């Protein structure tokens, strides 16, 4: 029987080094679909009709919330252990970035730019998206994440009556 070589992603150091890259990829995965949908809407509707349909601040809010979910979830799933702590750190980094980028944001209204006031809707939506992703990771509600049993370090082996290793059913081992 051929011996299998372990994947490079099996090494914890490699996976920890990949967390920022996975979080960045998750951010892109969260940004691209709403931006593409916005481009389709811009092609279908005129600018005034689109502004009446969905204001710019709400479009940016959807993009920010989707990006926050992708950033936190993808980075936390890439972490080899301590996913909750990784998600919390990623949420903090993302919240700081959102604050720096969106705190003083105001919609550009062309000639009426002097009238526009700063809006906190994109910032609040982005933070709420990050909180939702943090709760998904924290409560382990991600269907593709590793089960909680695999996140903990292996404990001591359990022995049966005769001193041998206690046998478990296949379902218990998988879960």
Image (tube, helix red, strand yellow):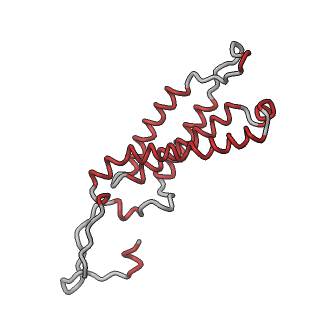
The percent position of residue 30, horizontal first and vertical second, equals 55, 45
Quarter of the view holding residue 12:
bottom left
Q: What residue is rendered at 45% in x and 59% in y? A: 145
Of the 4 image quadrants, the one containing the N terminus is bottom left
In the rendered image, the residue lying farthest to the left is 163
The percent position of residue 128, horizontal first and vertical second, equals 57, 40
In the rendered image, the residue lying farthest to the front is 43
Q: Nearer the viewer, residue 3 or 102?
A: 3
The percent position of residue 114, horizontal first and vertical second, equals 69, 12
In the rendered image, the residue lying farthest to the top is 114
Q: What residue is rendered at 39% in x and 76% in y? A: 172
126 up-or-down from 4: above or below? above
Q: Is 56 left, or right, of 161 in this rendering? A: right
Q: Is 131 left, or right, of 40 in this rendering? A: left
Q: What residue is rendered at 25% in x and 66% in y? A: 155
Q: Is 152 left, or right, of 39 in this rendering? A: left
């Amino acid at each position: 029987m051929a011996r299998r070589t372990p994947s490079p992603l099996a090494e914890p150091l490699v996976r920890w080094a990949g967390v920022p890259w996975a979080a960045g990829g998750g951010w892109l995965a969260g940004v691209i679909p709403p931006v593409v949908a916005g481009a389709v809407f811009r092609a279908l509707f005129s600018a005034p009709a689109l502004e009446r349909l969905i204001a710019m601040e709400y479009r940016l809010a959807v993009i920010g919330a989707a990006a926050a979910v992708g950033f936190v979830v993808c980075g936390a799933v890439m972490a080899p252990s301590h996913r909750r702590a990784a998600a919390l750190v990623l949420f903090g980094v993302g919240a700081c970035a959102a604050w720096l980028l969106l705190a003083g944001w105001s919609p550009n209204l062309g000639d009426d730019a002097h009238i526009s006031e700063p809006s906190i809707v994109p910032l609040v939506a982005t933070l709420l998206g990050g909180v939702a992703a943090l709760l998904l990771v924290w409560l382990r509600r991600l269907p593709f994440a590793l089960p909680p049993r695999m996140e903990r370090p292996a404990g001591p082996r359990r022995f049966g009556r005769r001193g041998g290793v206690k046998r478990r059913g296949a379902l218990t081992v998988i879960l």
